[in-house]
Image (cartoon, helix red, strand yellow):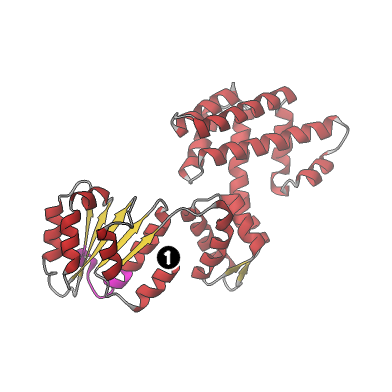
Amino acid sequence: MDIYQFRTLMNKDDKFPVFVFFGDEDFFIHEALSAVKARVLKDSDPTLALIEFGGDETSGGVIFDELRTVPFFSSKSKLVVVEGADDFVEKNRGILEKYLLAPASHAKLVLVCNKWDKRTKLSTLVDKVGISIECKKLKEHSLPNWVQTHARHYKKEITALAAQKLVDDVGNNLAILDKHLEKLSIYLSEKTTIDERDVDALVGVDRSRTVFELTDAVAQRNVAQALKVLSQMLTHGEDSVRIISLLAWQIKRLWRAKQILNQGGNEQKVTSELQIIPFFAKRFFEQVKLYTEEDLVKNHALLLEADVKSKTSSLNTQLLLELLVYRLCA
């Protein structure tokens, strides 16, 4: 069962006493948890009916006492959510097994775990009376299909080419992809299908602006500004591999532009070959003038070195990128 099937099921049925959501994709876990809250708490006051615990900081006794306590006032049922429940499950496995043989009729239990062993007796009991869903990160090749499916949540269709472009522009962070789909759905209003031009208009420019700002700062040897832009990119969900690949992509384009101009070509030829967005053409050629070919060769080598380190070194990701920025500005 995937998250969309689960949401459909929750719209019809809330009889399940226990839910387990596990895996490394926080967006899917959030979606699953939101679906349970919307169903279970629809006729209740969340301040009274929703109880949330941190599994690594709350004793099992407190959580089980809460499950056995009848909800206050008019709440028909209560929802007990245990986040980071791995330790709680491991320490209270036997008690949980007994609880699931006769779960409370007035309470729903949600366990949010990093890992969940499907071979255990506890897992078998959960699947017998409740639901467990693995929320794992999607493979890169699956992201455009996910975008097309998720767009329907906003009552829009998105073309395959536009979905691929959105993934190329934004990256693999589902929460950020979701926010862009929401923004596109609002922007398009009555238009039912999102195409490549729409993605270019709302998304592509944002990402290109950030890359240009970073390479601008590096070209001007402005370490403080480069670090500020880098921090913004990390805050918005870019990972180290993506940032390095974006920088390398831009450096290669600048390098190729420099070659074309040195060989007698003009800016129009550069714009045509490299498909420079008109909005950025002036700034792009300003950057071409700021860099020498030696600069670009050196920077490309530094980026290749950083790419290898990002995949093999134990160095903190942010520190690795900050060191890269210092070296690019040197």
Q: Is residue 243 above or below residue 144?
A: above
* Residue designated by label 1: 3
Relative placement, left or right, of 31 versus 214 is: left
* Quarter of the N terminus within the rendering: bottom left
**Count of labels shown?**
1
Query: Could you say where residue 197 lies in the image, as x and y percent from the top left?
Result: 68, 60
What residue lies at 60% left-to-right and 72% top-to-bottom?
192
Question: Can residue 181 be seen?
Answer: yes
Could you say which is closer to the camera, residue 149 or residue 228?
Answer: 149
* Residue closest to the far right: 264
Q: Secondary structure at mark 1?
A: helix
Residue 117 part of the magenta segment:
no
Could you say which is closer to the camera, residue 205 or residue 152?
Answer: 152
Q: Amino acid at mark 1?
A: Ile
Question: Can residue 41 be seen?
Answer: no
- In the image, the segment drawn in magenta is 37-50
Query: Could you say where residue 268 lies in the image, as x and y percent from the top left?
Result: 83, 43
Could you say which is closer to the camera, residue 56 or residue 223?
Answer: 56
Query: Could you say where residue 210 lies in the image, as x and y percent from the top left?
Result: 58, 42
